[in-house]
Amino acid sequence: MRPPGSRDDAPNVPPAQPVDVSPTPPADVSPAQPVDVPLAPPVPPGRLPVGDGWVPAPRTGPVIFPYDGGEFATAPVGDADLARRAVEHAAAARPRVAKLASRVRRQVLGAVAADLEDVAGPMEDLLVRETGKPRTDCRTEVRRAVATWQAAADEVVHIHGETVPLDLLPSGDGLFGFWTRRPVGVVVGIAGFNYPMMLASHKIAPALAAGCPVIVKPAPATPLATLWLVHLVRERLAAAGAPAGAVQLVTGDTEVGCALTTHPEVAAVSFTGSAAVGHRIARDAAPRKVVLELGSNAALVVAADADLDAAADAVARGGYYASGQACIAVQRVIAVAEIAGELERRIAERLPGVVVGDPREERTQVAALIDEAATERVLTWIDRARAAGARLVAGGTRVGRCVAPTLLAEVPDGQPAWDEEIFGPVVALRTVPDLDAAYELVNAGRYGLHAAVFTRGLDAAFRALDALDVGGVVINEVPGYRSDVAPYGGVKDSGLGREGPRFAIEELTVTRMVVIRP
């Protein structure tokens, strides 16, 4: 689930493969320095892309740079009335969007990928400012978004069906049958703050590829990069003779989200956020289709035969990238007893090389969390774990406005630092007697998104594939490794449905059976 204090639509955003840990010592956090970055995307100020044009928003709100807490831009803020207006426009545009030729959809999607490459530098700068995420992670986010749009373009040619042998029964003699896939209808995509533009891409691109009009709602804290993305998409749609209003965006709070997800004209909702909110959306949206990517506290299991240096490197890379604000960042390390002490030592040796500081600096790996409430919650969870008997190996303190990279040992059950999703630069290590106990411990939690296993043995690896109750199993790499063309999603309280362009397109289409008597 999303930690208390985080916004309802804060995401578990699928992370990029983390970067290597820098060998340099931690940088001191210094006051943020002015840099030449765009303060807003090149769109009409104070307006939102609703309908085929840009309409005035009811109000505007500040956009904060998390590293220094200062306002650096303002953004339009929508309301429930504007959300309903967007759905009504999408419903009216649905027949036209569904009839867009596959070559037009493919052309638009590919052109958006090229456009994102053209603005990669300023988009990266804007993401750094509105998310507070380290530059290296923002650069990866832009690259992943480009790949997502290109993959969606490539998948357009694969939206088809196949014939069915109806004559398997005598009643089918003389009949010809086939099935095809048709767009589900109006789609609502709710994204979040940590990878806002990439996550929005995983909502918008598959919807367009499938022939569905889509309305996206970004997180309140991070609307600007997604506004810019939607502007690029609408420009390409209009240039191709397609309705610009096939893609709309409404900012706002939970009132806007409720208006979108419960509207009777909406056919599908793709949501990334907390388990609690996801459950509510699933109930309120019924019988609409929902695709839910919810919470996680990803585990990395280390077997006795593992390469301990590789495992320790993976924890240092995979536990602290994006300041730990990634749903499949390493949160739990589960090590068999005979190597647990040595593994802990090697992880601790690497932590001074995880650079803390200004997210605009190239070597920074941990910066400030999205807001002060998130920072206070993470520090409180660390203190609670220690009070319950956990041992603090490293970190656990503030470094300016940041949380120092933290390693806890033997956090007991019942503590949120172990049971819940901490969404900060904190890793908890536990010792178990053997691999069977490790796999049982992974499965004992409420989440099941990704898990990793470090081992040299094929037997342990294949046992993990069968034993672990998760959506993705990664062997000898971080659980945060994700390819954007692969199926991505979880089980249990980590959600249902799958993202990745091919798989999201399947979620956003319906199978239509056709029977013909010639």
Image (spheres, rainbow, N blue to C red):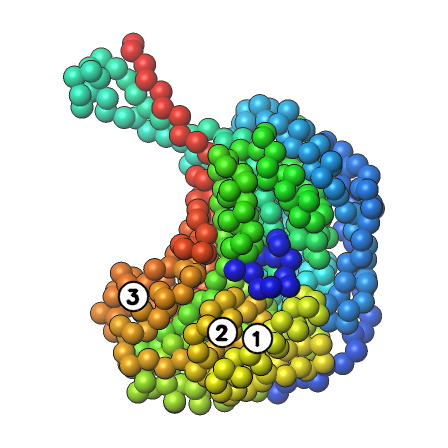
- Of residues 231 and 441, the one drawn nearer to the viewer in this rendering: 441
| Residue furthest top in the image | 518
Q: In this view, does 22 lie to the left or right of 309?
A: right
Task: Return the residue at label 3.
Answer: 464
Q: Nearer the viewer, mark 2 or mark 3?
A: 2
Residue that appears at 57% across and 67% down: 423
Q: Which residue is at a point 50% across and 67% down the rendered structure image?
A: 420
Question: Going from the N terminus, do you reach mark 1 or mark 2 first?
Answer: 1
Task: Describe the element under mark 3 as helix, strand or loop.
Answer: helix
In this figure, which residue is indicated by the disc labeled 2?
415
For residue 381, which numbered disc appears in the image? Answer: 1
Asked if residue 159 lies left or right of residue 23, the reply is left
Task: Tell me the distance, in whole angstroms, between the alpha carbons under discs 3 and 1.
Answer: 30 Å
Q: Residues within 10 Å of mark 1 (few under 14, many from 20)?
A: some
The residues bearing labels 2 and 3 have C-alpha atoms spaced at a distance of 26 Å
* Mark positioned earlier in the residue sequence (2 or 3): 2
Q: Which of marks 3 and 1 is nearer the N terminus?
A: 1
Left/right of residue 270 with respect to residue 5 in the rendered view: left
| Residue at 71% from the left image edge and 39% from the top image edge | 80
Crowd around label 2: few <14 · some 14–19 · many ≥20 (10 Å): some
Q: Which residue is drawn at 40% across and 80% down?
A: 430
Q: In which quarter of the image is residue 250?
A: top right
225 is higher (above) or lower (below) than 89 = below
Front residue (pair 411, 23): 411
Question: Hey, what amino acid is under mark 2?
Answer: Gln
Q: Where is residue 363 in the image (x, y as percent from the top left)?
A: 63, 77
Helix, strand or loop at label 1? It is helix
